[in-house]
Amino acid sequence: MATVAAHPYPPMLLDAALALHDGRLHVAEPLLKEYLKRDPFDARAIRMLAELAGRIGRNRDAENLLRRALELAPAFTAARANLALVLYRQNRAPEALVELDELLATEPDHVGHANLKAAALGRLGGFEEAIALYERVLAAAPGQPKVWMSFGHMLKTVGRQADGIAAYRRAIALQPTLGEAWWSLANLKTVRFADADIAAMERARAAAGLGADDALHLDFALGKALEDRGQADAAFAHYAAGNDARRAQLGYDPGQVTRMVDALTGLVTPDFFARRAGWGCPAADPIFILGMPRAGSTLIEQILSSHSEVEGTTELPDMPAMAHRVADYPRGLAALTAAQARELGEEYLRRASVQRRSGRPFFIDKLPNNWLHVPLIRLILPNARIIDARRDPRACCFSNFKQHFARGQAFSYGLEDMALYYRDYVRLMAHVDAAQPGAVRRVIHEELVDSPEAGIRDLLDRLGLAFEPACLSFHETERAVRTASSEQVRQPIFRGGDRAWRPFAAHLGPLEAALGDVIDRYPGAPAFA
């Protein structure tokens, strides 16, 4: 069996390690591959190659390499820690917890393992256990700014806003240039920064050697701080800088979504569904809330989660995972058999079950991007309810432009990219409406906030749920909320946010031009004329 410390690093492996440390991946990769040709059983080199794969987003390759390293050297804790992280990044928190428990059994005081375990517990809804774990970690190692920040995220999620703010402030006191902690404060949408805060952020933004991630987070935070003060031009400059930096990191291709929508609109017809009547898993448990991010989906989720028969979960990764199970997706939908469609529906329910904490008959999956998978949902879960949360395109797109997302939503970092994404979304939803009228229940955000009681009663009726007064006082419902709207939905409905784009109108020409007639065709357009 291979070992990991039996002999010192050979020169080639040392050179690769230094290149990896310095971020020179183009140097590290050929060195590692050449070294492994000579010694294919060196678990250290395999782990390094896995780390390289993970850095460029090839998480499945990284996982395979790390499992090989652990096969060769089961006691290689660094490889096991890497494997836990890769599993977590793939939204496989239960599997990550297995690895983390093994690590903590041998290294019980390791802050990094405990921090990742708390994050994995949070992803599975184990918030109180995660908070207790963070408290133990920080009692033992209080000088960890990123752990304080992660602790703040968990506290915010369960509604302990004051404690969350204190944790973020503690992180900033320890590391004033920690951009994500500043952005986390701004992202609460309830914090108003003092002059001293803005000065501190500006000093941090100008600091020598500031990392790219810290810089872009600070730009988003400064944008929010200056917007709150009515300084639209200065705020937009920071928003634009943050978005440009993030877009450059992601390399988003807007044509990929357009091509997928083209394929779906060519495939999905009334006859397509008629010939597959009775297919799929018949369970009616899921309620999908989908559409654009920042379109009011968290508000709808909070309203429905206040109902005695509905459980709120989070933005589940499981429907995209089902899509990946279909060869040549989305065209491969046409090749599925009835048995396969049922199996996929049942697998989705099994995967989603890890997030369920109550015996309520229905649960919510509010991943916005599931709009791309509505035809798949209709095929594998034909009795699931689907809600399209729709918001005015300018208000919605600008709200996304101001938002830095923890992960995903790569379309949101460019005004033209976002407009094209919105157009593709509207185009597919219109096609589904024509192919299966009434399959998707649409909720217009402006109508809901203008007439909450009428809108809530109508929504419940369309979902086949009896009216319950608790749905009107949704802001009093105590539950964990993990999205950017977590604090907003803990307050009564307000309308002001839908006009937030107006002071920035002079900067939104590219957005309006790319949206085109989608603006005029929006159901609530007259209210914004």
Image (tube, grey):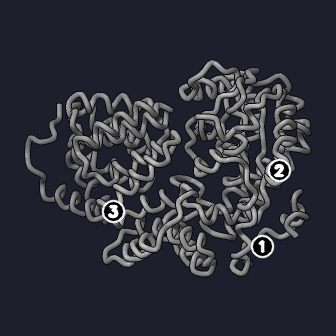
Q: Compare marks 2 and 1 and give the one earlier in the sequence.
A: 2
Front position among marks 2 and 1: 2
Query: As drawn, is 470 to the left or to the right of 180?
Result: right
Using the image, tell me which numbered label, if any, was put on residue 25: 3
Circle nearer the N terminus (3, 1): 3
The x and y percentages for residue 357 are 56, 24
Inter-mark Cα distance, 3 to 1: 40 Å
Mark linked to residue 189: none
Residue 91 lies left or right of residue 329; in this view the side is left
- Asked whether disc 3 touches disc 2, contact meaning CB atoms under 8 Å apart, the reply is no
Q: Earlier in the sequence, mark 3 or mark 2?
A: 3
Picture quadrant of residue 213: bottom left
Please name the residue that numbered disc 1 is placed on.
512
Q: Quadrant of residue 477?
A: top right
Image quadrant occupied by the C terminus: bottom right
Q: Quadrant of the N terminus?
A: top left
Q: Amino acid at mark 1?
A: Glu
Please, which residue is most extreme toward the left here?
7
Judging by the rendered image, the residue that carries numbered circle 2 is 444
Q: Nearer the viewer, mark 3 or mark 1?
A: 1
